[in-house]
Amino acid sequence: MRPVRLVILAALTGLVLASCGAATTAAPGDVTFDVQLIEVKGATDGIEAPDTDPTTLSAGYGFVPPGEFDSDNPNKWQVATYMYSPGAMSVVQGDRVTLRIFGVNGDEHTMLVQAPDGSTTVESFIVNRGREVTVSFTADQGGHYKLLCANHAPTMTADILSTGA
């Protein structure tokens, strides 16, 4: 019985080492992501409101202070933020990337896609609430592409990591 355990242990060890050290490659292809533009809100009367109005930190933040949010509860306040869902995606360098972007919250989002070198990959386009816009680009650079919203900068961004083929 002991030799069988050693064989199983050796086989499992080999699989673990192979999976950790093995380099995997994928050929570039077509990749499509469904991206939603959402606003997340949270309200409380259990803690003090922040000293700094979050809207002064980013146009992507919302804040309704105590006394304004709920007239029946003068201690209750609310914060909000706009975001992309998903906020992070991964592609292989050379992939043809298609983003189907649907506006759930926010009347208008003026967006663009920025390449890792800072150049604009997809020029400015607008997504309105209740509408879907499709944009495509080829991830010809390795690194981080950024999906940016000009209306809610600097916090409303999504990251598309392009890794070597």
Image (cartoon, rainbow, N blue to C red):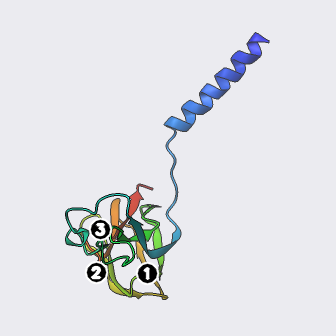
Say whether residue 20 is left or right of residue 78: right
Q: Mark 1 = which residue?
A: 105
Dividing the picture into quadrants, the one containing residue 149 is bottom left
Q: Earlier in the sequence, mark 1 or mark 3?
A: 1
Please tell me which residue is depicted at 29% across the width and 68% down the height of the picture: 155
Give the residue displayed 67% in from the left and 26% down from the top.
Answer: 11
Q: Nearer the viewer, residue 58 or 14?
A: 58
Tell me the kind of residue under disc 3.
Thr
- Along the viewing direction, whichever of 85 and 90 lies nearer the viewer: 85
The residue under label 3 is 155
* Label 2 element class: loop
* Residue at figure coordinates x 41%, y 56% from the top left: 163
Q: Residue 107, how many percent across, how many down?
A: 39, 88
Q: Position of residue 162 (x, y in %)?
A: 40, 60
Residue depth check, mark 1 versus mark 3: number of the one nearer the observer? 1
The answer to whether 17 is drawn above or below residue 128 in the figure is above
Q: Determine which residue is flagged by label 2.
A: 151
What kind of element bears circle 3? Answer: loop
Query: Could you classify mark 2 by the number of other residues whose Cα lies within 10 Å: few (under 14), some (14-19), or many (20 or more)?
Result: some
CA gap, disc 2 and disc 1: 13 Å
Can you tell which quarter of the image residue 75 is in? bottom left
Q: Amino acid at mark 2?
A: Asn
Query: Residue 109 in the image: x percent, y percent?
Result: 35, 83
Around disc 3, counting alpha carbons within 10 Å, would you say few (fewer than 14), some (14 to 19), or many (20 or more)? some
Q: CA distance from mark 1 to mark 3?
A: 15 Å
Q: CA distance from mark 2 to mark 3?
A: 10 Å
Quadrant hosting residue 58: bottom left
Secondary element type, mark 1? loop
**98 versus 2 height, above or below:** below
**Extreme residue in the right direction:** 1
Percent position (x, y) of residue 154? Answer: 25, 69
